[in-house]
Image (cartoon, helix red, strand yellow):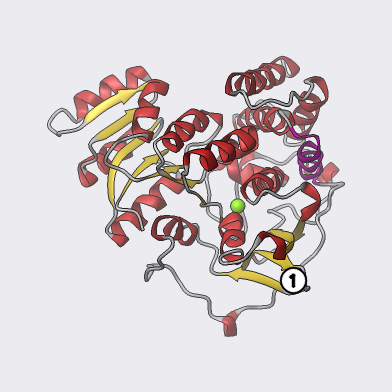
């Protein structure tokens, strides 16, 4: 179990839940980082007394420094500040809950310091899976997944040998538009897209869940985390989100992890692992479950998932390009600048236009990420 954490992205959905878990389990919070909801950041800083707070935007950092000048806290800014928060000497674990590829450099810096990474930033493994997992293995840093599906797979594989694993069964709810045709989704609004049936999450990931790009990103993530090939992973739609994923073993046995759909559970395990602690979350009552159902994903009407699976097969920078293009398109959709179905169009066009490069060089990876972002802006200009 960890003693002290740095929380990157502390005002977002995962960040806030992480702080609640830390307070419940008596884990210290020594560094915080945020780029939005600065009022909340101040509230958290006054309550938790971290040693260091990173505010990405320089001007916002200056204002924040003035707001908390009565406290004994150092305020830093920019990518350098974010990295400082990640390698804060007091903390033995970094929760990477920032959204987007901005999480990559701080995660690698924390790995070099042998800190436990409680990984909640999908883009880290989607963009640079080989580099990040390779560096963690070399430097001896633990990576514990926070995403509910990967936490489930991690738990199903505990104490098992790799050769026992036949395949990973990655489950997903299918999102709010399960069963709908792509043509019917043309006029979907951001308000409709962010209403997830089971999970309460931030806006970007909620849209990704609606398009099933989220499952696609998780597919790539699972490949790297558990060092398997795309053929070893099967996506299974399970609308109730009670099973959080499963593994099938070579003898045909299937092991599943179940629980209430609350991100607090995988967050707590990532911090207390290998121990388990009493939690503040609801427990499952099997007598109240209305039944668990399963179906194959509809790849024709959820083409983002098919695109991600293709990019997983291609490898190299293909998933990074897809993820960066998707990120830009989702934010444009949330601002009302493009229609819902254009998100897939933009991601697919970027993947088709930008050749995949097989590299473990961070600068080359980040260049592919930037190229994809510029591509989408030009695509809609
Ligand atoms: Mg998930």
Farthest right residue in view: 300
Front in this rendered view, residue 252 or 305: 252
Q: Residue 161: image x %, image y %?
A: 64, 63
Give the vertical position of 275 relative to 253 (above or below). Answer: above
The answer to whether residue 238 of the structure is visible from this angle is: no
**In this rendering, position of residue 347 left or right of residue 369:** right
Crowd band around label 1 with a 10 angstrom C-alpha radius: few (<14), some (14–19), many (20+): few
Q: Residue at x 73, y 19 (%)?
A: 380
Q: Residue at x 64, y 42 (%)?
A: 207
Give the vertical position of 138 relative to 179 (above or below). Answer: above
Secondary structure of the residue carrying numbered label 1: loop
Which image quadrant for residue 131?
top right
Q: Residue at x 58, y 38 (%)?
A: 134
Span shown in magenta: 302-315
Q: Residue 333: image x %, image y %?
A: 65, 32
Q: Is residue 208 magenta?
A: no
Q: Quadrant of the N terminus?
A: bottom left
Q: Residue 275: image x %, image y %?
A: 40, 66
Which image quadrant for residue 77?
top left
Front in this rendered view, residue 17 or 316: 316
């Amino acid at each position: 179990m960890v003693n002290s954490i740095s929380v990157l992205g502390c005002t977002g959905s995962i960040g806030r839940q992480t702080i609640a878990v830390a307070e419940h389990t008596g884990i210290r919070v020594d560094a915080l980082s945020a780029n939005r909801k600065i009022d909340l950041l101040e509230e958290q800083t006054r309550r938790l007394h971290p040693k260091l707070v990173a505010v990405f935007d320089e001007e916002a950092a200056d204002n924040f420094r003035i707001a908390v000048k009565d406290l004994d806290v150092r305020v830093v800014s920019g990518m350098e500040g974010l990295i400082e928060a990640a390698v804060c000497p007091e903390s033995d674990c970094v929760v990477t809950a920032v959204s987007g590829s901005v999480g990559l450099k701080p995660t690698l810096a924390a790995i070099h310091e042998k800190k436990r990474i409680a990984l909640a930033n999908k883009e880290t493994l989607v963009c640079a899976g080989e580099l990040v997992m390779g560096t963690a293995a070399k430097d001896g840093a633990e990576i514990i997944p926070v995403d509910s599906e990967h936490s489930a797979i991690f738990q199903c594989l505990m104490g098992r040998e790799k050769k026992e694993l036949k395949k990973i069964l990655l489950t997903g709810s299918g999102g709010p538009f399960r069963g709908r045709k792509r043509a019917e989704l043309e006029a979907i609004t951001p308000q409709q897209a962010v209403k997830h049936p089971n999970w309460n999450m931030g806006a970007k990931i909620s849209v990704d869940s609606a398009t099933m790009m989220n499952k696609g990103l998780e597919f790539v993530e699972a490949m790297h985390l558990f060092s398997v090939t795309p053929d070893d992973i099967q996506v299974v739609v399970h609308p109730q989100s009670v099973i959080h994923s499963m593994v099938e073993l070579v003898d045909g046995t299937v092991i599943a992890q179940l629980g209430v759909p609350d991100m607090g559970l995988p967050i707590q395990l990532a911090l207390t692992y290998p121990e388990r602690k009493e939690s503040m979350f609801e427990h499952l009552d099997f007598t109240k479950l209305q039944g668990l159902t399963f179906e194959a994903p509809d790849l024709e009407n959820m083409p983002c998932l098919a695109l991600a699976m293709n990019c997983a097969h291609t490898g190299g920078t293909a998933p990074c390009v897809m993820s960066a293009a998707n990120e830009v398109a989702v934010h444009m959709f949330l601002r009302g600048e493009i229609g819902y179905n254009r998100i897939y169009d933009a991601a697919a066009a970027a993947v088709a236009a930008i050749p995949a490069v097989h590299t473990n060089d961070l600068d080359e990876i980040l260049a592919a990420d930037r190229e994809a972002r510029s591509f989408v802006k030009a695509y809609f200009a």
